Amino acid sequence: MSQGIEILQKIFGYSAFRGNQEKIVESVIAGNNALVLMPTGGGKSLCYQIPALARFGTAIVISPLIALMKDQVDALIEKGVEAAYLNSSISHSEQDDIVGNLLNGNIKILYVSPERMMNEYFQRILERIEISLFAIDEAHCVSQWGHDFRPEYMQLGMITKKFPDIPRIALTATAGEATRGEIIRCLNLHGSSLFISSFDRPNITYEVQKKTTKEKDFYRLTQFVQDNLEGQSGIVYCLSRKGVEECADKLVKAGFKAYAYHAGMSANYREKVQEKFITQKNVIVVATIAFGMGIDKADVRFVAHMDMPKCLESYYQETGRAGRDGLPSQVLMFYGLRDLVLLKRIANKGVGAAARRRVNEEKLDAILGFCEATTCRREVLLNYFNDPYQGPCGNCDICLSEQTKQKLINATEIAKAVLTCVYETDQRYNVHYIVDVLKGNISGVIQKNGHHHITSFGYASKEDEGFLYSLCRQLIAQGHLKMIMDGSSEIKLTQSAIDVIEDRKEVMIRADFKKGAPASKSAATKTKATKKKAVRKKATTRKKAIATYRPNDGTDKTMYENLKILRSKLAKQKRTQAFKIFPDKTLMEMAAQRPQTLDDLESIYGVGPKKLQRFGKIFLEALNGDA
Ligand code: ADP
Ligand code: ZN
């Protein structure tokens, strides 16, 4: 047995590596550098934790997520690993203790913030100890073009100069080509092994909806929450603090246990919300994007975005917080043209080079393209991350929708009118104006510039306005039009627009878009029958997923529920998170296999010797009816 797998089983209690983990672990144990691209929840931590335990000396893990460090270290200590962390939240006397232990060689894994890593005093200490490896977590933070740039990260290049012979492993869940190049340059990983895992999260069901009215969208949200909460937890993201407070308030009024969370609240209050989210059931946190970073909660059943995120990287990361336990989970996003305008304005406000603004703009175009996708969402999303994937996936709204199965319709004629209109008005106006012209809205147009030669004027007077807006979005998403972000939101033609106007290209749109009214696809207007059908369908997928963990299909929901209750009691007692005691999968296996002895129990997924010792007896008692 290799050293890596032995540590995986003995210390971490897992029976097998996932995906690329084994290759990565073996390579780093052998002393090689590595760049690891793996989606959130894919299991990056073990990629450096196992080599850290296999190699001689102390592993230094650099992470920007201070909030995460304590949890990770606690989890390691729980498994009997000598781990510690140093960051600004630690008192001086504690720091001295940790440094003492470090110098005595009593720490196998030390987590530090990037600021600490740059501290000269700390670097002098590092020179006096044996270092097994450097792990640079969230390595995309070196990238200026990324969504999460940290200036301190750029300076980490110093590691390669000061400690050139110590293996470096850089890890991230953001895989864009440009970001990857920057990580390689900054951390001098030229020629290192590159490990790219598939970014697919097959257990997540993607759904995206156009915004309608606040009331209807909120109604849809409550349905979504109702259908998916399942006694577990969920996150709702809003763009603004005001949006957060409103939405949380409404959810509470609708009878849910919802809490608002944003940077304008006191640290104390936020901590309380976070604690509730982690330890209680049925909790929904409504938050700005500040929430979720570093919260390793495996049973988040849904993530909803009430507004469009600023890029697909953020969207992927935020939705990636759902279903880390591998069980079916749902994500839902609402988007609208107004989000786009707002986000463009925000992006434009930031100081920085024109190049950076252009990148932001392209990122916005990409996410809009995802929202307006006419093909499988998973396909659009994964291709964006250079992860070739061919739909249909059967697990996104487009693949699942009966309506989109009616195929696409050819909208070349009306699209040509829109593009011509943009051309005839000198590419100087925004979408609203273009729609006005096409509708032949005299008061909006003629008075403004008196163009009488506009052939597209009134061309679409009979078309529904909602449809025209939707068509403009489609044309932007498909790359025929570009929105300029200097605050005016002017739209311009691209080369591909010229191809359409000159009949070299056709424009296809989703049939349901043609139906017009922006609300057409909202579940609020779905018939009762289809709703019921959808619920039934979901229930079956979920059952299937659970069944895969039950070799004998002796479905014993009661036992599983009992074990969950026991687990949450223990978690409360020990002030830890339930899944750190045992993940859901472990409880499912226990309920299905009914182990009788400690030996039986040890063969269950997720049960290592340390946990067997701590929790074995009490779970056996529960399993055998004494509890
Ligand atoms: P990431 O850092 O990539 O988001 P983590 O390292 O936090 O992911 O791992 C996500 C979850 O998957 C954790 O609960 C972890 O314990 C679990 N996990 C990781 N590797 C394995 C494995 N080989 N077998 C079973 N569970 C694993
Ligand atoms: Zn799909």
Image (tube, rainbow, N blue to C red):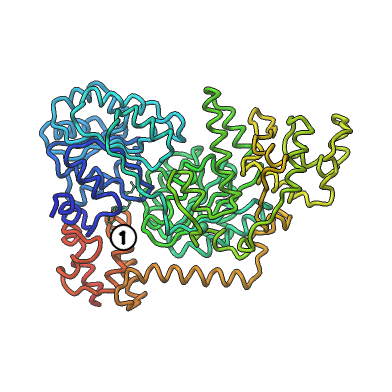
- Report the residue at 23% width, 76% height from top: 624
Residue type at mark 1 is Pro
Q: Answer above or below: position of 47 versus 529.
A: above
Q: Answer above or below: position of 397 versus 387.
A: below
Query: In this orientation, which residue lies closer to the viewer: 196 or 582?
Result: 196
Whether label 1 lies within 8 Å of ligand 1 gets the answer yes
- Report the residue at 20% width, 26% height from top: 163
Q: Is any part of residue 257 visible from this angle? A: no
The N terminus lies in quadrant: bottom left
Q: Residue furthest front?
A: 504
Quadrant in which residue 400 is drawn: bottom right
How many residues crowd around disc 1 within 10 Å: few (fewer than 14), some, or many (20 or more)? many
| Residue identified by numbered label 1 | 583
Q: Is any part of residue 258 visible from this angle? A: yes
Residue 454 screen position, x and y as percent: 84, 35
Residue 212 screen position, x and y as percent: 68, 52
Quadrant in which residue 623 is drawn: bottom left
